[in-house]
Image (tube, rainbow, N blue to C red):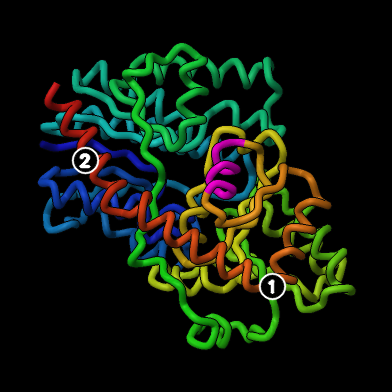
Amino acid sequence: MRILLLPAYFDPEQMASSHLYENRFQAFADAGIDMSVYVPMPTRGIDDKTRRLFKNKKKECLYNGHMMLFRFSMFREGKNPLLRAVRYVLCMVKHFYCGIHAKDIDLIYLASTPPIQGLLGGMLKKIKKVPFVYNLQDIFPDSLAGTGLAKKGGFLWKIGRLIENYTYRNADKIIVISQDFKKNIMAKGVPEEKIVVIYNWVDQNAVIDVSRSENKLFDKYNLDRSKFYIEYSGNIGLTQNMDMLLEVMEELQESYPDINLVLVGEGAYKAQVEKIVAEKQLRNVVMLPFQPYEDISHVFSLGDAGLVISKPGVGANSVPSKTWSIMSASRPVLANFDENELKDILAGNECGIFTKAGDKEAFKESILTLYRNRALCQKYGENGRRFIMDNLTREVGTQKYVDVIKEVVKN
């Protein structure tokens, strides 16, 4: 069996969900599934030296021969949303060409980044006459409306809905990452039998608790081990409500100088965050770049608690995968998020505190609750790790993907 993959990003590019891709690829390889992969030259989180290094790596054989990777030239991804959109379209054109000429393909597997991937998958399915499996990690155009980039009912929204409907209609199976995602697309007319819910997992062996005394990032970045840290790791973009988070840190700075925020990541809003931190002289905010995946345990063990945060209206249908990494590292989750199943998971398993997205005062109080009660903080962390081991291990999640692929090809 050979499947076609056309991802927008690939190693050595740095993304918050890189481990999910790598774990899936390994699971496919272990199951004897061969992969033909076409990707643009690396851009995200990559310096010019690394990019030049991959300029001549047009073809690679990976995963013990089960993956043939082909790279094509493409200009760098910048911060400008319009130029990024143009780049996505050009990549789609190139991916379409590569897909047409790919040999001996039994199935097309595509994920929802960027959202026009679904359009690509539907077209290639018709030409190649093979099944198409779509992995829905973000619901478009709902997510655009949540960020304010598109108005519900507006022109961009309508285009997005056309692409969304086309994708769902042509996909043989749609893998969604939450029950709320399933409800969302069923309300749009997708039959239930076409949908499979597979939560984003965490590699429970790769993300473990690292004690503060042994965490090398404290020494690397000269962090004071005696302070109480809340940590955000991931994309620093328009949807994460960084403005509110920084307002909270400004209000806590004088009264609670021992409470510090660590931001680990990159993104379109990072420069603005840095500007706000400098202008407001926030001494309790530390910003770090993305760290190598091999240090992921150190990253998620930096904080006494981990943050899952978004603007109102953005996260109604999702449970961010960083939630599982926080819990796997035995850290409590501090969520300021739209009410969905994340609230039930945290409350039902006593592994964190949920507050409504945009409720600054409640969010600030949740931080102070854990700051004042370290025993509760530890208890929530231990409960989170137990939840991961019982429900969301790498082996369970990746096997479900393998089962879906084999079932669709078989039928």
* Numbered tag placed on residue 362 in the rendering: none
Direction from residue 60 to residue 122 in the image, left or right:
right
Circles 1 and 2, Cβ within 8 Å, touching? The answer is no
Vertical order, 307 against 403 (above or below):
below
Find residue 262 and report its image quarter.
Answer: bottom right
Residue 314 place in picture, x, y as percent? 64, 36
Nearer the observer: mark 1 or 2; the answer is 2
Q: Does residue 42 show up? A: no
Residue kind at label 1, given as amino acid type: Val
Vertical order, 402 against 277 (above or below):
above
- Is residue 68 magenta-colored? no
The single residue placed furthest to the top in the displayed view is 189
Q: Which residues are magenta?
A: 340-348
* The N terminus lies in quadrant: top left
Find residue 254 and report its image quarter.
Answer: bottom right
Direction from residue 96 to residue 324 in the image, left or right:
right
Residue at image position (54%, 28%) is: 140
Residue position marked by numbered label 2 in the rendering: 402
Q: Does residue 275 show up? A: yes
Instruction: Classify 10 Å Cα crowding around label 2: few (below 14), some (14-19), many (20 and above).
Output: some
Residue kind at label 2, given as amino acid type: Val
Residue at image position (33%, 61%) is: 54
Residue position marked by numbered label 1 in the rendering: 286
Vertical order, 14 against 261 (above or below):
above
Closer-to-camera residue (96/322): 322
Closer-to-camera residue (130/104): 130
